[in-house]
Image (tube, helix red, strand yellow):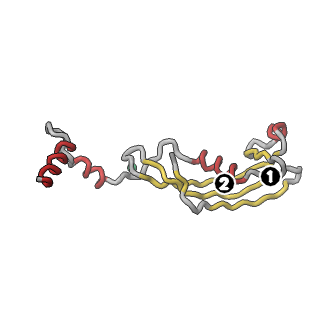
Amino acid sequence: MATLSSGAKVTLRGYRELYGSKVIVGELQAEAQMTCRRCLEPVTVVLESSIRWGLVFSESEMQDLEKDMDPILVEEGQIPLRQAIEDELVLLLPIMPTHESCNSEWISDTESVDISENKSPFAVLAALKNEQGS
Ligand SMILES: [Zn+2]
């Protein structure tokens, strides 16, 4: 799973369009900590999106909304902004997060571990431990 870094930037502006729709536009910028699918190290993913939400007050109003707007259902006079922002961020998360180029040094470190011999790395560690203990 992803962990959202603190300090997400959200700029929102509400206005009413000529034909009556209430619209919220804005910019969303956040960072999430995810796991790189190539090297399994943490990777910071930048999430950026333009927001264009249309406020609706019933399920039927959602149908009437322009196609280029995401409907936000206002319930009991409350705009679920936090929920809407979280939903937006979840949509922006990459399915396969990877570094632009994974740290090759880190990879060569793992390659230097010799597991081709009969002894497993754990057996070697156990042997070292025994030596120190004697
Ligand atoms: Zn990576």
User: Could you tell me residue 57's position as x and y percent?
Assistant: 84, 45
Q: What's the mark number on residue 78?
A: 1
User: Circle 2 sits in a helix, a strand or a loop, which is it?
Assistant: strand
Mark-to-mark CA distance, 1 and 2: 22 Å
Judge from the rendering whether residue 11 lies leftward or rightward of residue 124; answer left or right.
right
Closer-to-camera residue (133/104): 133
Residue in the picture at 19% in, 48% down: 125
- Residue at point 15% right, 50% down? 128
Question: What residue does disc 2 label?
Answer: 50
Q: Secondary structure at mark 1?
A: loop
Image-based side of 131 in relation to 3, left or right: left
Answer whether labels 1 and 2 touch (C-beta < 8 Å): no
Percent position of residue 24, x then y: 76, 55
Q: Is residue 61 above or below residue 19?
A: above
Sequence-first tag of 1 and 2: 2
Residue at far right of view = 19
The image position of residue 45, as x and y in percent, is 50, 53
Q: Residue at x 44, y 53 (%)?
A: 43
Judged left or right of residue 100, residue 108 is left
Question: Residue at image x 47%, y 55%?
Answer: 44
Residue type at mark 2: give it: Ser
| Image-quadrant location for residue 61 | top right
Q: Looking at numbered disc 1 in the image, what kind of residue is underneath it?
A: Gln
Question: Vertical placement of 15 versus 72: above or below?
Answer: below
Label 1: few (<14), some (14–19) or many (≥20) C-alpha neighbours in 10 Å: few
